[in-house]
Amino acid sequence: MNDVIVQKLKEKFPESIDATNNFRGDLTVQVKKNDIVKVGEFLKNDPELSFDLIVDLLGVDMYRPEGRFEVVYNIYSIKNSKYVRLKVLVDEDDCEVPTVTDIWPGANWHERETFDMIGVKFTGHPDLRRMYMPEEYEYHPLRKDFPLMGIPDSIPLPRK
Amino acid sequence: MLVADHPKKSQILQALEDADTTVTIEDPLENTMVLNMGPQHPATHGVLRVLVKLDGETVVNSVPELGYLHRGYEKIGENSTYHEFIPHTDRLDYLSPLSNNVGYVLAVEKLIGVDVPVRAQYIRVLICEMARVASHLVAVGSMAMDVGALTVLLWTFREREKLMDIYDVLCGARFTTSYTRIGGLQQDWTDTCTAMLTKFLDEFDESLKEVGGLLFTNKIFIDRCEDVGYISREQCIALGMSGPILRASGVPRDLRRDNPYLVYNDLDFDVITAQESDSLARFYVRFSEARESAKILRQALQNMPQGPIHADETKKVLPRKDRIYTKMEELIHDFMLINLGIDPPVGEVYQGIESSKGELGFYLVSDGTGHPWRLKIRSPSMVNLSALPVMIKGAMISDIVAIIGSIDPVMGEADK
């Protein structure tokens, strides 16, 4: 099944697919950032593949100069009982990714969480508020340069 | 007088726009009212806060707010070794700690490539199903309590207590079990546990009948739950639901069957589905799933072979205590594993299990050191809660508790 997916994607989007990786049976496809919506739409609407369920969406801070953040989309096909991971690289100075909430509405809260924790903005997201931290909070706690013990006085106290 | 013209309007608005409030509401208080439910409301199952906009008694719109129990487990995971994180998984879904333990170690074992002996896999199936039964008992009982039937909760808690006693004998803790180890288990399953579990299973059918007798033909309960909290099959898939909510909408997705892990392939069980996709259907699905779990438990007890419960991988699996004290090699391995952690390969894996709430997944990114570079918890409660606005739109205010009860969220897991 993994080979079929890779072949189909490479035929359809020869320019958009940067790399594919198969580790312990998990298929990861690295996609160019601006093409994530069209690749996602294809994977969802292709009758043979039909990746219709978004399981998870997350951000990883790789802490490197080029493509510091990774946004990972973990999608599932109920028809084939198959997972696939899409991955896009995001630079720190251009920290924006097109939203996939139009394809999978379930991505809504995941994208909010990723924005809250990693600080990647999702352009076109209907409601990009923070998920866990207070709205005025200025840091993104899951970045690698955020200290484990937190930053003193960074959480605003309630007004009296 | 309309609420909008009320002289106290500005005060209400001020309270809503307090520094803690992170919600913006369009057309504020036209002739609708905004009600803040939680985070300390007894029927929200923890610290869930829901802002509901009401027209009379009908819910027009709602915004769930999370984060009141956010403890930063993903950050803690990045800063502890793979072993050190196991106790933290107890505190995610604290109604079924055993299956969280299993889900996490399965992900780590997939990453480092360890095969666990068959006996250990059977024991893991046993504890996963015990956790599911215990969690569904609480779900059924607390949902009935939310709509006014307090007795059911007391009866289901009595049954759950028997399972807690088994946990106690098995791993020395009733609640925060931390029972699994990477490549094995903390202790072996004993004959005492077999006897206790057999006794529990023998009485379980009867006690489920008792509980069912209180609810199945109870007009008040059925009226409160039927056609309440409807969500269509398409919406369920679009929003990424999993577990009993998805199955109550007619999608037979169960990871135990679709993407089998452990030894679920060798066990015979049915995937329970319902078509109605309302609160009552979710209640029935949980009820029947508890029965199926009892079936799995019996089979697993019968088929469980003898043998070791630890994988024979000295550089990855913690050695036994008695050998650490007597053997040089084991002492060195123990020292290295505790202080530096396992050396996994560089890579990333995702492993999901069918926990009682839905798909519980762990995504691990490894950079080759003893700490995970990134640990992401895919928690079913959080994703399932994202369907709450769809379910309660158009419902009555008193239905909200029945709907939250039928989602069965655990905030420890939703907030991580």
Image (cartoon, coloured by chain):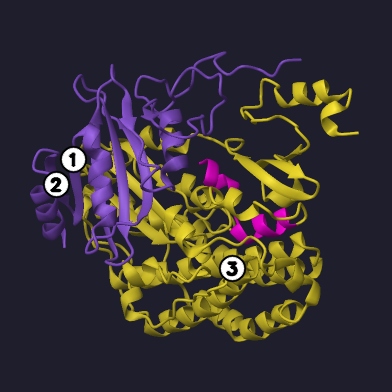
Chain colours: A purple, B yellow
Q: At 30% from the left edge and 62% from the top edge, which residue is drawn?
A: B310
- Disc 3 marks a residue whose amino acid type is Arg
Mark toward the start of the polypeptide (1 vs 2): 2
Q: At 65% from the left edge and 53% from the top edge, which residue is drawn?
A: B392
* Predominant secondary structure, magenta span: helix
Farthest residue to the right: give it. Answer: B1
- Spatial CA distance of label 3 from label 1 is 38 Å
Label 3 sits on a secondary structure element that is: helix
- Disc 1 marks a residue whose amino acid type is Gln
Q: Are marks 1 and 2 in contact (CB under 8 Å)?
A: yes
- Spatial CA distance of label 1 from label 2 is 8 Å
Q: Along the line of sight, which residue is nearer the eye, B190 or B182?
A: B182
Give left or right: position of B101 versus A28.
right
**Residue B284, x across and y down, in percent:** 61, 74
Magenta-drawn segment: B399-416
Dot 1 surroundings within 10 Å: few (below 14), some, or many (20 or more)? many
Give left or right: position of B299 versus B326.
right
Give left or right: position of B30 versus B322.
right
**Residue A52, x across and y down, in percent:** 34, 57
Q: Which residue matches tag 1?
A: A30
Q: At 73% from the left edge and 41% from the top edge, which residue is drawn?
A: B40
Chain under disc 2: A
Q: Along the line of sight, which residue is nearer the eye, A76 or B202?
A: A76
Q: At 29% from the left edge and 65% from the top edge, which residue is drawn?
A: A81
Q: Is residue B406 magenta?
A: yes
- Disc 2 marks a residue whose amino acid type is Asn
Chain under disc 1: A
Residue B282 is labelled as 3
Q: Is residue B307 magenta?
A: no
Q: Which residue matches tag 2?
A: A21
